[in-house]
Amino acid sequence: MRKHVMLASTAATVVVLAAIIRQWKLRKERQWKKTQRILRRLARDCATPAPRLWQIADALVHDMEASLASSSNGTVTSSLNMQVSYVDFLPTGEEQGLYYGVNLRGSNFLILCARLRGKNDPISDLHREEISIPSNVMDGTSQELFDFIAVAVENFVSKHPESNDEMPEKELGFILSYPVNQAVLLHGTAIKWKSFSADDTVGNELVSNINRALEKHGVNNLRVSAMVDDAVGHLAGGRYYDRESVAAVTLGMGTNAAYVEPAQAISQRHGPSPKSGEMVININWGDFNSPHLPRTEFDACLDAESSNPGCRIFEKLISGMYLGEIVRRVLLKMAQETALFGKRVPLRLMTPYQLRSPDVASMHQDTSEDYEVVDEKLKEIFGISNSTPMAREVVSEVCDIVAERGARLAGAGIVGIIKKQGRIQNRRSVVAVEGGLYEHYRVFRNNLNSSVWEMLGNQLSDNVVIEHSHGGSGAGAVFFAASQMKNSAS
């Protein structure tokens, strides 16, 4: 009798366990299906087929034209606030000599020097020094900031002096790694996020301040004539190597673009017509917005919770500052609603901006069989040590969708610029691209290039040549210095 009872009890236990296992499998299947639904919707909302890319390119052209035509009455007809840089001379490729530059990047700056040998020869003797700005200087007055920079320039020049046969006075190329119209001298404080134009009172005051600081600290052979965005510097570098360089794009933590525009097309220009007949325009394309842009629920939440809601929409879709954050938000939703990483949502996954774009690039480009790089990054960044190969594959797919969208939108922007210049059909146009996303993120770079080819087709795509900027980070300041020497001599 006891034996029959034990057998019956064992059988019941087996049935219960089988039921539990079956329920567990059904729950896992439901969770996996929901994960896939979230993934499919993300892919659908981020989709950038060629017709949509053309809508975006055409919308950009429209806003560029509206911004150029805007009058002083304050009427806003464009999402763009393009700035005339008043740079009307770019290098010809014949420039020779040693040139110096400063690249102010926020909490640090680069000082560079390099020798140009003319005839489009590569730059040589390139020296670069990165200097951190102390917090007390960042919080001090603008003059204290410029004094600090001037002392560093004097030390740098003493270590890398010019030859005795060089010109007694030269331009110091001064570029900012953010749009010029976002940095301003305000009530005596240092660099603040505000607005100024390249030729207004504030812009001139900044230039005067840095020149006074240079003279005060014994740098008597260098002077600054203008401060420009680094995209303008990259365009100067592109023009040194190729006369058909007509635009430059920055794709790093932030993003911007600059291009060459005939002077007669610029109604907001002041002063006499430039001798060159053209001027460089700072597009500030991070501000671009259009209903055609493929935005998701994650983008809307990111924008709403940002420090500048409703602004810099294009930048929030394509720049390195935000790619990782969009991916994190998608993964967080999956973790909360589908238990992608287990029953408990990892605490560090809830921390905004925990995921950086270099980490996205590493996970996206992981080609190992079980996504070992993804596994390593999940452990390192979010403390997720129990991810399954299927979950890691999902992470890689999310990175792919978000990065591909950003790259293809950047490609559409490039096509829009070339179309605005009227060069797509029958003229060769070179676009210089600089920044970590383009330089170090191979798949991002490939997606950008393929989107341009897809939009233009076999015949016309050869007319648009996308090249990585020459000289690396900050080198645009050196080329800009060379271009301003020509301007001064004219």
Image: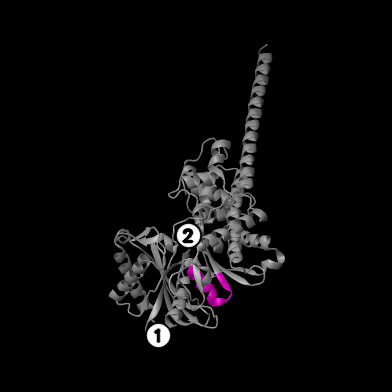
Q: Which residue has dot 1 on it? A: 167
Question: x and y percent of residue 12 in the render?
Answer: 66, 19
| Whether label 2 touches label 1, CB < 8 Å | no
Of residues 452 and 199, the one nearer the viewer is 199
Read off the magenta span.
232-246
Q: Nearer the viewer, mark 2 or mark 1?
A: 2
Of residues 486 and 102, the one nearer the viewer is 486
Question: x and y percent of residue 179 in the render?
Answer: 45, 62
Question: x and y percent of residue 338 in the render?
Answer: 58, 37
Question: x and y percent of residue 122 in the render?
Answer: 53, 78
Q: Residue furthest bottom?
A: 165
> Is residue 42 shown left or right of residue 69?
right
Callout 2 crowding tier (Cα within 10 Å): few <14, some 14–19, many ≥20: many
Callout 1 crowding tier (Cα within 10 Å): few <14, some 14–19, many ≥20: few
Confirm whether residue 383 shows in the render: no
Q: Residue furthest right?
A: 458
Confirm whether residue 250 shows in the render: yes
> Is residue 48 shown left or right of residue 170?
right
Queried whether the magenta region covers residue 245, the answer comes back as yes
Q: Which residue has dot 2 on it? A: 81
Q: Residue furthest top?
A: 1
- Tell me the residue at 59%/68% (across/down): 421
> Is residue 77 shown left or right of residue 135?
right
